[in-house]
Amino acid sequence: MLPICISDDMQDTTHFIRPATARDIPRIETLHYLTWQEHRTREEGFDTAPFIETYTASVTHPDDSRAIVVAERRGQFAGYAAISVTGGPLKGRRLGIDDLAVLPQHQGHGLGRTLLDTVLANRPRRTTVAMAMLWPRNVAARDLLLKAGFEERDIGARYKAYRRRL
């Protein structure tokens, strides 16, 4: 189903969502490290190490359990979503929204929601639930997930879980 082209009439631009390629890896990793640094500054006790390499490796060495899609705006790299799939087709699969980031200059144009909607619409067959884990002060991501129909789950950890039945 990918790539997907979505028009943004208000800005007379186009959002283009597509699978990541090897050429995207440096931009994806740079954006991941920038957002990781923001989390370290904002979140008390943030001690998670950067993890994007496990996803960018799936770009050059395809992996059925991980993938990255890229958003372009005005023909430029604007953001990405890294996803994972666990479980099996008999009991249902779980889609993990593991990382989603949009460059600051492209925020506010619906790209985060477009990325999220695209990965949900293009999920593997028999996927029964989507999940995301967020640090408590990640308000923009929390609001995005709640507007997309995710429910907050208290799991007794330093971060919050968000779940949506599919």
Image (cartoon, helix red, strand yellow):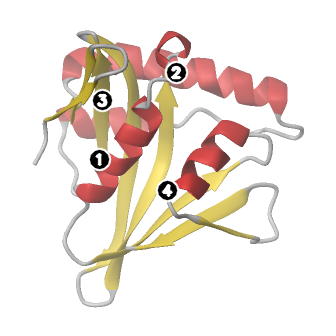
**Viewer-closest of 61 and 80:** 80
Sequence-first disc among 1 and 3: 3
Amino acid carrying mark 4 in the image: Ala
Label 1 and label 4: CA atoms lie apart by 12 Å
Label 4 and label 2: CA atoms lie apart by 17 Å
- Disc 2 is placed on an element classified as loop
Q: Given this view, does label 3 or label 2 mark the residue nearer the observer?
A: 2
- Disc 3 is placed on an element classified as strand
* Label disc, if present, on residue 107 of the rendered structure: 2
Pointer 1: what residue? Answer: 118
- Give yes or no for contact between labels 1 and 2 (Cβ–Cβ under 8 Å): no
Amino acid carrying mark 2 in the image: Gln
- Give yes or no for contact between labels 4 and 3 (Cβ–Cβ under 8 Å): no
Sequence-first disc among 4 and 3: 3
Residue at 24 percent across and 78 percent down: it is 126
Pointer 3: what residue? Answer: 70
Q: Tag count in the figure?
A: 4
